[in-house]
């Protein structure tokens, strides 16, 4: 087993290691050792999978509302 790398999460498994880590989903970020993916704050999102830090969450596009992992026009 290997340590959970940044950009991946353990899908709720208690241990810091897992044989098959999950790629962090869009709209979320996963610091190193993440048990679960973390939501970007309201008004922010990540347009790609595998974000590693809160600093990768960017402001929602103009005219969109980003909250609860959903983006509305």
Image (cartoon, grey):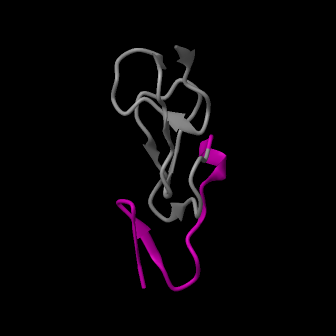
The residue under the point 57% across, 16% down is 2
The residue under the point 48% across, 51% down is 25
The answer to whether residue 49 is magenta is no
Q: Tell me: residue 13, above or below residue 47.
A: above
The image shows residue 71 at horizontal and vertical percentages of 42, 73
The residue under the point 51% across, 86% down is 63
The image shows residue 35 at horizontal and vertical percentages of 42, 27
Camera-side residue: 41 or 17? 17
Quarter of the image that includes the C terminus: bottom left
Q: For this view, does 65 lie left or right of residue 5?
A: left
The image shows residue 4 at horizontal and vertical percentages of 55, 24
Most extreme residue toward the right, as rendered?
55
Camera-side residue: 66 or 27? 27
Q: Tell me: residue 32, above or below residue 24.
A: above
The image shows residue 44 at horizontal and vertical percentages of 53, 62
What is the span of residues highlighted in magenta in the rendered image? 52-73
């Amino acid at each position: 087993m290997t340590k959970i790398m940044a950009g991946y999460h353990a899908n709720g498994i208690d241990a810091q290691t897992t044989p098959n880590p999950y790629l962090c989903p869009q709209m979320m970020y996963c610091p190193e050792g993440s048990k679960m993916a973390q939501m970007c704050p309201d008004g922010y999102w990540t347009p790609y999978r595998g974000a590693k830090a809160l600093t990768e969450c960017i402001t929602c596009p103009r005219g969109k509302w980003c909250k609860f992992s959903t983006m509305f026009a």
